[in-house]
Amino acid sequence: MTTSISELSAQVRRLRKHDAWYKNPLWGRLAVIECLALVLSIMTNETQGSPSDYTLLFKDSWFCVRGVQFLVAGAIVFVIAEVWRARGLSRIAAQATQPVRDLRRNKVLTNPWTKRGVLLAVTVIAVLLPLMGMFTLPYFQSVLAGQVGVYVLAALGLNVVVGWAGLLDLGYIAFFAIGAYTTAILSGKLPVGDDGNPELHPPIHLNLFFAFPIAVLLTMVAGLILGAPTLRLRGDYLAIVTLGFHEIVLNVAKNDPRGLTNGSLGATSISTFRFNLFGVHYDWRTNDAKPYWYLAIGIIIVVVFAFRRLEHSKVGRSWTAIREDEVAAAASGVPTVKYKLMAFAIGASTSGFAGVLATAKITAITPDNFPLTLSIFVLAYVIFGGMGSITGVIVGASLMTFLPAFLQGPPSWFNSGHPVVNVNDIPMWIGGVLLVMMIFRPQGLIPSKRRAQELSQAEHGVGDADAMTSPAEGVAQ
Amino acid sequence: MYITQHFWELLFQGIRLGSLYALIAIGYTMVYGVLQLINFAHSEVFMSGAFGGVFMLTALIGNKGKVPSGFAAFEYTALALLAGAAVGALIAFSLERVAYRPLRQRHAPKLVYLITAIGASIFLYNVAGKLFGRNNLQVPESFHSGKVFTFPGAGAPGPRTVKSLDLLIIGSALVMMIVLDIVINRTKLGAGIRAVAQDTETAQLMGVDVNKVISRTFLIGGLLGGLGGVLYGMFHSVTYTMGFAPGIKAFTAAVLGGIGNVRGAMLGGLLLGVVESFGQAQFHLEWVDVVSFVVLVAVLLFRPTGILGERTGRTA
């Protein structure tokens, strides 16, 4: 085989280019770190941009001392990281922390009684939380009851649909809204009559505790209504249809069919929970959030207990089978239609609880309380915490709901009365946290054992980590 | 009947809206084709493209309030569209590099991609809001959008007038779609995209550089999305949250046409635009979303993989 000079020189040029200094991955890493530093320099800048001068923020965070500071900090981080890498320090660190990780397999810790003890301790801490530190502030108590408790419940329900049955639901808050509107109707604040005053002719006026079973039943039916026509659809098609379902529910609420939802005005001054049994009388008052928190904990405990039983029952195993391979599950005699509908119904009914709870806490609802982004956020809580793992979902939802509230901060909390970051920047930080978290820990904070196993298998090319891409056509028929 | 009286103008409005949807939907569908990923951050590509166009026009024309004419008008419009497309492509490209490539290397499940995309979307539009302010920006007029012709019919001539801006929107969308169709079906890059969409592993074995193809797919989607953003901004206005609603609609259009299928996205976009236009006339403005989603559900009930079925590879 003869090789001409021109071909040879072309090869040499190619080889040279491969060895060129700028091809060294070192510089790529430096560039990434410096870019990150520049982005952080903008993110942490207190200045807000103005439409009249769109270069303002660049001038204010890149082309000034601030930009240089961030670049230098980035370079320092780069040097440390490279030294770390060159010395193999991560291995040394792994060796040093090995005893800690071995603890996980310790007999005492894996003992079911220890687990139950930990569970009890966590519950006690949750109950005592409003008496501790910053949670004594009414602002944080309100956040606990109105956000953390409610969204933990919602995320637990969505976990059934997404984490266990593997059905992608992007419209979950629609059920939450149905629960909330049911509460408003049952408490006599909706529908408003022609005069706009529901008080004059209340169709129903119930104690809100009775709203729980009715809302749960209604959301369950709504779940079936959504589930039935979508059984043939697979992952992404299901996503858009559920999203459409949310949009339809929201539009119906907004457009006020026959005064039932009072349009964009919604319902106000909805009564709260009260209790009058065996001579004991108790009112959940709007100025104290603690009782709502205790109620939320109570419901969460019941739901978690039920779901734990469900997870390891025949139903839970069927869901796992459907999630991992729907065709194989159907072939093995799992009635996929029944179990998929069941997942939708159970998932939806949990958000009925959450809807009643949230409505009683905030006492006023409008369609704006249930935006599409909220549905997406609840899904993000589930994935963030670790799909399929009850602990993970609870931790994920609590952290992700608490973080924005914490960043916003109550007035005069610390930082001399200013919020920790500018209120307008909070969604940016949430998005950033979500992004970074997913890139570096795709399995979520506390993944369930089975999901972690599926993920590591998928990483090595064995099977798919979820059933989102396998066709479900013809299976459901 | 209002609809029969105003059939042609409603159809025209639908096509105008639909061609914008189609431009964005192509980005969703192409990315879905190669990665099986709903790129929720694509709406932010659209938004950043619009910002690119606005700033280009502001830099060129300024706030003098004088509308350029003649060759200048043509030049400025073309430059704004180019700037928007370039910014959109840049954002889409870096998105793939920063967010999706690390996940791909770890074979992360699809849901993780989805949440990453959502995180990126939230992050990007809020950064844009922080950078450029949170008010509506009016796009400086790069040309005088005069009346071209009027549809015959009863009632006020206002909604029946076709302006040059309308023709610009439809025209550039049409040109881009034809060019894209040629690129997908006739060029080497298009063959690569189709191969990766059909079977990534086999394509890799056949010598297709999958990473490069995916990067370029994002580039093309970003180009079209950015261009659509500028056109949308010229018609409405530009703000940091402008991506969300058209993004959802374009995604619906992509699913309607059969996600993963480029011609399906074009068809789905146009169809959704026309359905919305007629739905708005027949029912009310506030029921438009309900109408379009009901149509989507109805189509998916009978054809669970959309009108033209799936995958870029199979149809071409």
Image (cartoon, coloured by chain):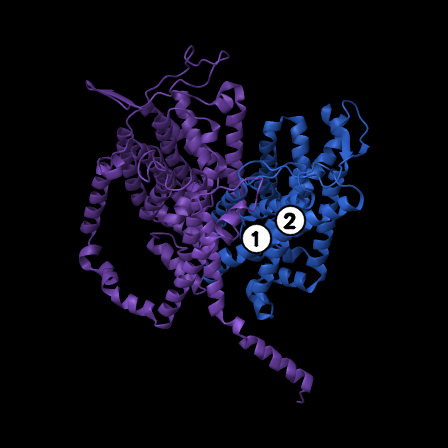
Chain colours: A purple, B blue
What separation in Å lies between label 2 and label 1 (alpha carbons)?
Answer: 11 Å
Name the residue located 68 percent from the left edge and 51 percent from the top edge.
B82
Q: Which residue is mark 2?
A: B84
Q: Secondary structure at mark 1?
A: helix
B63 versus A178 height, above or below:
below
Question: Is any atom of residue B111 visible in this view?
Answer: no
* Place of residue B267 in the rendered image (x, y in percent of width and height, measured from the top left): 68, 45
Amino acid on which the number 2 mark rests in the picture: Gly
Question: Is any atom of residue A397 visible in this view?
Answer: yes
* Quadrant of the rendered image containing residue A400: top left
Q: Chain of mark 2?
A: B
Amino acid on which the number 1 mark rests in the picture: Ile
Q: How many marks?
A: 2
Q: Seen in the image, is A310 located left or right of residue B274?
A: left
Indicate which disc residue B91 carries: 1
Name the residue located 39 percent from the left edge and 46 percent from the top edge.
A382
